[in-house]
Image (cartoon, helix red, strand yellow):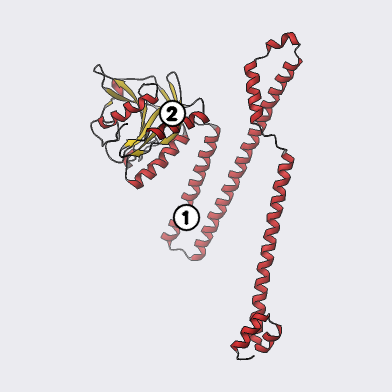
Amino acid sequence: MATVAEAGVSLVIPNAAYSTDLTIGLHPLAILNISDFYTRAHLSRTDLLGGLIGKQTGRDVSIEHTFEFRLADGQIDEDLLNKKLEQFKACFEDLDFVGWFYIPLQLPYEPTEELIPVHQYLAKFHNDTPPLLLILNPSAEAVMNTQSLPITIYETLFTETGKPQFVEVQHRIDSFEAEHIGVLYVAKQDAVVTAEKKDTTESSLAGRGKAKEKMKKDEAADTMTSSNAEEIVSQLNSQANAVKMLHSRLQILQQYLDYVQSLPDEAVSVADLEVLRQIDGLVGRLSTENFGDVAQGQQIDGLLAALLGLVTKGVKYGVELNAKRQMLDVQRGPAAAASTGPPIMTERLSRYYGRS
């Protein structure tokens, strides 16, 4: 197992001394996961490292998922690492281990001698070749006055003596449609929160009254409501487009199957058996439920929930009416309360006023 130690001497080669043709696509989901890992590492005040999952085609690498390494006494838990890789392989057959990330909480924010044992240890999960190394720079200088991400990705090179060194590789941001929608949602929510904080700060600095502050809060609530409505419409449009695309693709598959069935027996060999097996697997994954029955069941559940709400509201009004009637009986005196109140209340009022 590899041991995680403290930082030391830098091993980075200047970009001017070496140029690489390696291209890397970094996906938003991996960036968000690494940011979340940094938040927990910052709270625990410990360095954090984990794996990068993606796929490599020649000299083009895409980083799509990440996961955290478990450390025990400064060593990587190899059993958990193998289990994680098996789980990813079972869900995403075309993805594999392509590298690892490191989040240092102190200088230097780059590869050092102390990271070499970990790097060499993880090479056996990457076909015995050096994996990529991604380092997050959480310092304030790395994010101020710049629009680039505080992330650096390194490729490993070897000197004539076999000593590993690192060269920085430029990366681009890639995203699937689902990731694009998720990033837009996060950006909109962040904009709403920022607008609310700005309105609150301006209101407190100007010393406005409670009425104006309430008006600002109402406007912020209206803005959030309209933003949520726009987000719902956007999600519904995306789902509708996905359903239309799925329908068109299924129509193409149906036309292909009709064509294959129309072939004479001597021409059946024209059909691609691999394609037919893939179509059979796709049909097996599609839902066979009756959508009409599902929709009717959801409608019934909604009506039952609405009816339960009405019953609960009726019970609430009944309790309030009974409480008000008892208050009126108390104000009119014990005689009226004893004649009209419920038995328990009548007994309590009689004891209070000393009557049997």
Question: Residue at label 1?
Answer: 199
User: Which residue is painted at 44% across and 33% down in the image?
Assistant: 83
Q: Can residue 230 be seen in this view?
A: yes
Residue 142: percent from left, percent from top: 33, 38
Residue 88 lies left or right of residue 2; in this view the side is right
Taking depth in this image into account, of 217 and 237 the one nearest to the observer is: 237
Q: Which amino acid does label 2 sit on?
A: Arg
Q: Which of marks 1 and 2 is in front?
A: 2
Q: Quadrant of the C terminus?
A: bottom right
Residue 308: percent from left, percent from top: 68, 59
Residue 294: percent from left, percent from top: 71, 42
Q: Quadrant of the N terminus?
A: top left
Question: Residue at label 2?
Answer: 172
Q: In which quarter of the image is residue 18?
A: top left
Q: Can residue 136 be seen in this view?
A: no
Name the mark on residue 238: none
C-alpha span from label 1 to label 2: 36 Å
Q: Tag 2, which secondary structure?
A: strand
Asked if 129 appears above or below 212 in the picture, the reply is above
Taking depth in this image into account, of 143 and 210 the one nearest to the observer is: 143
Q: Tag 1, which secondary structure?
A: helix
Task: Estimate how packed mark 2 is, as few (under 14), some (14 to 19) or many (20 or more) residues with alpha carbons within 10 Å.
Answer: few
User: Which residue is painted at 27% across and 36% down in the image?
Assistant: 5
Q: Which amino acid does label 1 sit on?
A: Asp
Looking at the image, tell me whether mark 1 or mark 2 is earlier in sequence order.
2
